[in-house]
Every structure is written in structure tokens, then in C-alpha cells.
Image (cartoon, rainbow, N blue to C red):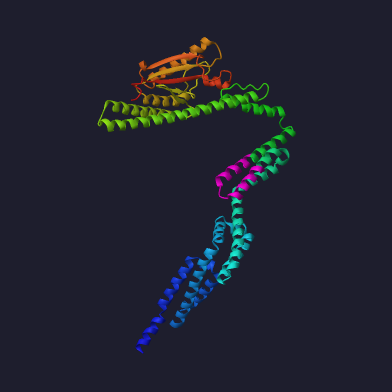
Amino acid sequence: MCLYSTVNAQEFSTEQCLKDLKLAADNANEVSAKILAPQTYKKALAAQGKANSSSKKAKYICEQAKKSSLYFRSATENAKLASQILKNLILNRRNAIKVNGPNKYLSKWQKAERKFVLANKSIENGNLERAKKLNIEAAKDFNEIELLCIKDELLSEAKLKISLAKKEKADRYAQITLAQAQKFLDMADQELTINRYNFDVVTNITNRSIERSAHAIFLSQLIQNTQDDLITTEELIIQWETDLEKIANSADIYPLMTDGYNSLTNSLVKYIDILRNEKQYLEQDQKDNLIQIADMKEEIRNLDERLGGATQERETLIQKIEAQARVKEQFDKVEKMFNSAEARVFRENNNVILRLIGLTFESNESKIIKESIPLLVKVEKAIDVYPRSEIIIEGHTDSQGDDQLNQKLSQLRADSIKQYMINAMRVKSYRIIATGFGETRPVANNETALGREKNRRIDIVLHSSQSNEIN
């Protein structure tokens, strides 16, 4: 009797039964059995509720707990099977959820979700063929929902812009440009259909569509204004020509448009091509310098291996490398002192040139105006970077006016800067040379207003011999 009581107590230990139940429930939840095996999981929950009743006897609780555990284990197995059979469906459903498919396309979502639930129930009921069929159908539905959401996200702005363009009557007054916007939108839509995750490419295409729509709006409004006599055709053309003149002036090209825009267009294209080639040359020159430095370092290593210790050749190479590094460091430091409106900083051989774009004088005057003082303070800091350099102040004018007067004015302005350096910057006079070149050394086209402005300038040349260049 005593032995029977002990066995009976172990068999119906509520603590152990509930512990086993919890383990089975955790395993089921871990494989998402609630979603992938809903019928069996529901039965497990019902039995679990009864097992958790504190008013029942231990035997009843354990019976319900074991029953619930059995259902949970069955749900776990069904969920694992569903994960294999419905692999594509589950993945597509998850992707649709990530892009907020249930909220954006509720009707389509509900339809696909019903198929998903039926597919899971079919697996629980052992009808695997039906489950596989539903897997294909529902996976396709969720895939479509995800694609629709992605298209909404990436194409919405372009669609809105086309709609705004149509409200501005671009479909009537700017049909070609609006058609271009629609074409780019269609291309983006097609690209997403082929590869929905190619976001960078699609973004670039939609941006082009947005730009074309915006331009269609501009053209539509402009054309309507000309028709309403708010602006004449001649005024419109003059507006465009004024903009072209600004571009031409920046490129230092005389904006000749006597017979249309072909000549100016060709000149601008040629100018841009030259700049591009110069840029490529400079980039290649920089690469060559880096290679040269790397070769020097390699030569040092080879010398060390062959000769060991310090040698004259080794010291010479080290000095060259250090000199090049310090020259670059000094130049970079000076270059960063000025913004584009203040000065252009560049090198010519051993010279560092400060072209003081922001330094101006009153017409036909050489007196330094107070607005130029902050720029000259920066010039002083630049000079301090090269304490042993010779300072050459060059005065230049444009070609307007008398040659001799221009020569005299340029000299007076250079002398004015020299005197300021001596008095305000405390630079030794023997370091400074002031020279006026008048109109003899233009850097831009004197036929344009912007070109003449560039030619009226003060250049500060910081000259260092090769031996004194680095300090």
C-alpha cells in the first residue's frame, strides 16, 4: 500500500505535469505553431486552460496537462512540416508584412491570408496535395502585395509630380516633356517588376521622371504666360540669352550669339572638354607622385637590406620624401584658409600664389578699403606658413583705359599692399617686392565683364628657393 501511494503521487505530481506542459508549449511557440498549426494549437490551449485550474484535483490537472502537451507536440510537428512545404509562402508573407502590406492592401491581404490558413489546416488534416496547391497560389498573392507596396513607396513622388503637371495643363502645352516624364516612370515600374530590390537604379530613374515633370510644369506655365501676353517671345529669348551670357562669362568666353547659339554652344563644350582633360591630367599627376614616393620608400628598404644602417643615399631619399610631404602639408594648410570668394591658391614650381579675388579697390584708387582687412589678416597667416619666403606683390588691371595709367595704377595698388604688410603685418621690407604689370598679364578675356573683373587683381607670390622651401 505504501509503494502504491508513492507511485501514484509521482504519476499525478502537478508540478512535474505543468513543467512538461510548459516545455511543450515553449517548443510549439518557438516554431510558430500558433500560425502554422492553428487547429492543433487551439486544442492544446483549451486543454492547457483546464490544466491551469487550481480548483481541480491533481489527477485531473495532470490528465489535462498531458493532453495539452500531446497537442502542443503534435502542433510542433505540423508546424515544422508546414515550414518545409510552405517555405516560399511563409517567406513571401513575411516580406509583405515588412512593407506594411496588411494595411495598404487589406482586401488582397485577407484573400491571401485565407489561403495561407487553409494551407496550414490542410497539412494538419493530412491533405498535403491541397496544401502544396494553396502554397503556390498564396505565395503568388503575397508576392504581388509586396511588389505593389514597394512600387507605392518608390514611385509615389514621380506619380504625384506627373499628376501636378497635368493640373498645370502640361499635357496640352508641354506634351513632349510630360511624355518623357511618363516614359521614365514606366521604366522605373518595369525595373521593379524585374528586380524589386534594385532601389538605387529605380531611384535614379524616378528622379529623372520627377525632373521632367517639374520642367513640364515650368514650360507649361511659361507658354501660357506668352499666350496671355504676360511676356513676349522676344523678352523670353532675351532672358535665356542673359543666362547664357552668365555661363559664358564664367567660362571666360565672349557670348557671341549673332546667328543663334551654335557658336557659343560649341565654345562652351570645348571649354568643358579642356577642363575635363586638365582634371584627368592632374589626377594622373597625383597618382604618379604617389607612385614615386612609394618607389622611394621601396628603395630605402632595399638600401637598408643591402648596406644596413644609415647611408648617404638613404638619407637623401628620406629628405626628399619628407620635403615632399611638408610641401604638401604647407600648401594644404594655406589653401584651407581661404574660401572660393576670397582667393584662389595654387602652385607654380616653388611658388605658392594667392590670387586675391576678394580684394577690391575703389575705381581708379589704390587705397585699401576696410572691407578688405579680414582677407589681408588671412594673407598674414598664410605668409607665416612660409617665414623664409620672398614675397612678390603683383598688381594687375584690365585693358580698359590708357596703358600708362593702368601701369601706374597697378603699381600704386601693389605698393599700397606692400606698405600695409610692413606697417600692419610687421613683415621686413627686404622680403617684399611690389610690381605693377598693368594690363600686360591678363588671366581672363578682357572682352567680357567677368573677364575684366578677374584681370583686375592682386597676386601674392610666396617664392622659396628649393633649399628654403621647407621650414
- Residue 409 visible here: yes
Please state which of residues 299 and 272 is positioned toward the viewer in this rendering: 299
Q: Measuring from the top left, give residue 121's x and y in whole percent.
A: 57, 69
> Which residue is drawn at the image coordinates 59% and 27% (left, top)?
269
Furthest-bottom residue in this view: 1
**Could you say which is closer to the camera, residue 131 or residue 206?**
131
To which quarter of the image does residue 38 belong? bottom right
Q: Is residue 187 shown in magenta?
A: yes
Furthest toward the front, the residue is 306
Give x and y (percent) for residue 16.
Answer: 40, 76
Magenta span: chief secondary structure:
helix
- Determine if the magenta segment contains residue 171: no
Q: Can you say which quadrant of the picture contains the C terminus?
A: top left
Answer yes or no: is residue 336 visible. Answer: no
Instruction: Indicate whether 415 appears above or below 54.
Output: above
- The one nearer the camera, 190 or 327, is 190
Observer-nearest of 202 and 191? 191
- Magenta span: 182-211
Image quarter of the N terminus: bottom left
Q: Position of residue 320 (x, y in %)?
A: 34, 26
- Residue at coordinates 42% horizontally, 74% vertically from top-left? 19
Residue 284 higher or lower than 204, as above or below: above
Picture quarter containing residue 129?
bottom right
Question: Which residue is most to the left?
Answer: 309
Give residue 65's position: percent from left, percent from top: 46, 77
Q: How many numbered marks, from 0 up?
A: 0
